Image (spheres, rainbow, N blue to C red):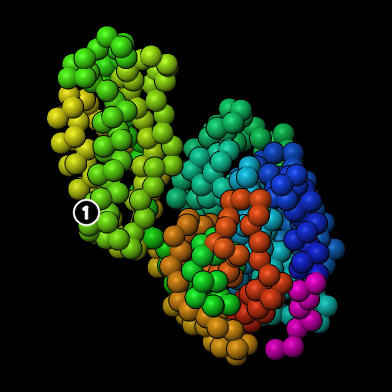
């Protein structure tokens, strides 16, 4: 395939996009449905419309830029990712997948090549979850994983703004039924790995065959608040000491049973959190991730048993309430094989890999064949201003993605 794909143009687009919400540290702060996110969306829409793509925005703000195929009745091939970033975000997490998709459509436009099925470039609303929890909420709404009204009523963590109101304020509340994106032939998402494996092992690309099962819960430990000077140790019901012991037990359970999994305490809140006071309350966000659904369950059962034992010994109460979870995701084998074959043709050193992070593709995979392609990022650093990739990685990812997307759009219906 001889498409006029240009890594220079892709790179210029990435830098222009990174300018919107650029931070002094060299990163990007472009929260979902902020004024900056709206500016980024407008730029993408302009770029897409300049090459004749048709923009559709759904009621959850998901953007779709469509290039017609020879058979416009065929379900389209979707390619995309997200433009929103973490407050401490970099230039590539999200935009790489969106803008690589755009570059494919530009090259097709320049070459005057028409695919059999239409190709639709997607920018999902609010992937990061730092304003509207949970992560990937726009894709979840579109794929029916969360009901539309529930997404629209979600309130921002930072300023309490309702998702639906933020859409209206920024001018990105569309008219299309979010369910329309479900009727697609395939979904492709290119993304930076956000981990250190590919670079450390000398690979150019990762063919993502699936993702870890994940469960995150808020653990609430309740004891009794008392005076730090006058309460003897044996008479205390110190929630923080209980929480500390539970957290260490959670790590030990993973190490003993399934060291290839992941355990993280992302947040820790002390109540009342005052000097001179034995804390009567502690809450922590506790998560396990594991490639196997049954093992994830076992880890959580072990943790629940350990937490209960620790609480009882320390005369505390404990409750673990899950609020974010998804099962092990398995991506489509045919689409993965197309990426693998394209990588081999291009002499790219590639390996199969599982994603430890959540991505919009997980929700797409619940409705259609879906797959992801990872390019390495330096030092595995992501969600950080110094997040970086090489032009070589950007280019090989672009070329391999383009071939697999176009092959899928030209495959017999
Ligand atoms: Zn991302």
Image quarter in which the N terminus is found:
bottom right
The residue beneath circle 1 is: 298
Q: Is residue 342 left or right of residue 294?
A: right
Majority secondary structure of magenta residues: loop
Q: Is residue 234 left or right of residue 293?
A: left
Q: Is residue 368 left or right of residue 63?
A: left
Residue 389 lies, with reference to residue 1, above or below; the image says above
The secondary structure type at the circle numbered 1 is helix
Q: Residue at x 62, y 80 (%)?
A: 400
Q: Residue at x 30, y 49 (%)?
A: 251
Is residue 380 or residue 303 the one in the foreground? 380
Instruction: Residue 30 in the image: state x and y as whole percent.
Output: 69, 44
Is residue 17 or residue 327 the one in the foreground? 17
Task: Find residue 318 and report its image quarter.
Answer: top left
Image quarter in which the C terminus is found:
bottom right
Tell me if residue 3 is in the magenta stretch.
Answer: yes
Instruction: Residue 409 in the image: state x and y as whole percent.
Output: 62, 78
Q: Is residue 197 visible?
A: yes
Instruction: Residue 348 in the image: state x and y as whole percent.
Output: 59, 84
Q: Residue at x 65, y 54 (%)?
A: 386
Residue 139 lies, with reference to residue 272, above or below; the image says below
Q: Is residue 137 visible?
A: no
Tell me if residue 399 is in the magenta stretch.
Answer: no
Q: Which region is colored magenta?
A: 1-8
Is residue 339 or residue 226 the one in the foreground? 226
Task: Find residue 163 and report its image quarter.
Answer: top right
Instruction: Residue 385 in the image: state x and y as whole percent.
Output: 66, 50
């Amino acid at each position: 395939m001889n498409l006029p794909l240009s890594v220079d143009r892709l790179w210029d687009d990435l830098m222009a996009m990174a300018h919107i919400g650029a931070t002094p540290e060299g990163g990007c702060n472009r929260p979902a449905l902020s004024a900056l996110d709206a500016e980024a969306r407008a730029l993408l829409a302009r770029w897409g419309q300049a090459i004749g793509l048709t923009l559709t925005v759904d009621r959850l703000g998901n953007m779709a830029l469509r290039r017609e195929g020879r058979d416009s009745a065929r379900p389209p091939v979707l390619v995309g990712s997200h433009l929103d970033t973490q407050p401490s975000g970099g230039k590539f997490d999200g935009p790489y997948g969106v803008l690589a998709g755009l570059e494919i459509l530009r090259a097709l436009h320049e070459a005057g090549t028409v695919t059999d099925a239409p190709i639709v470039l997607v920018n999902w609303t609010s992937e990061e979850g730092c304003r509207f929890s949970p992560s990937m909420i726009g894709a979840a709404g579109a794929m029916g994983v969360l009901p539309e009204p529930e997404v629209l009523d979600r309130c921002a963590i930072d300023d309490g703004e309702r998702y639906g109101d933020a859409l209206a304020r920024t001018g990105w509340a569309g008219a299309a039924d979010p369910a329309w994106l479900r009727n697609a032939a395939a979904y492709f998402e290119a993304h930076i790995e956000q981990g250190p494996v590919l670079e450390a092992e000398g690979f150019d690309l990762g063919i993502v065959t699936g993702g870890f099962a994940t469960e995150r819960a808020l653990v609430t430990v309740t004891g009794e608040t008392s005076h730090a000077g006058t309460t003897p140790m044996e008479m205390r019901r110190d929630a923080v000491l209980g929480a500390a012991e539970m957290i260490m037990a959670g790590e030990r359970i993973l190490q003993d049973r399934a060291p290839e999994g992941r355990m993280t305490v992302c947040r820790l809140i002390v109540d009342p959190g005052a000097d001179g006071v034995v804390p009567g309350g502690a809450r922590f966000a506790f998560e396990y991730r594991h490639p196997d659904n049954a093992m994830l369950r076992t880890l959580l059962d072990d943790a629940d048993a350990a937490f209960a034992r620790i609480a009882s010994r320390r005369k505390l109460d404990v409750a673990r309430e899950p609020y974010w979870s998804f099962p092990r995701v398995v991506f489509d084998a045919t689409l993965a094989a197309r990426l693998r074959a394209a990588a081999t043709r291009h002499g790219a050193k590639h390996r199969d890999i599982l994603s430890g992070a959540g991505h919009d593709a997980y929700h797409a995979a619940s409705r259609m064949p879906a797959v992801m392609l990872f390019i390495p990022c330096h030092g595995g650093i992501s969600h950080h201003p110094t997040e970086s990739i090489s032009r070589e990685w950007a280019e090989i990812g672009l070329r391999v993605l383009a071939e697999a997307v176009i092959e899928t759009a030209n495959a017999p219906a």
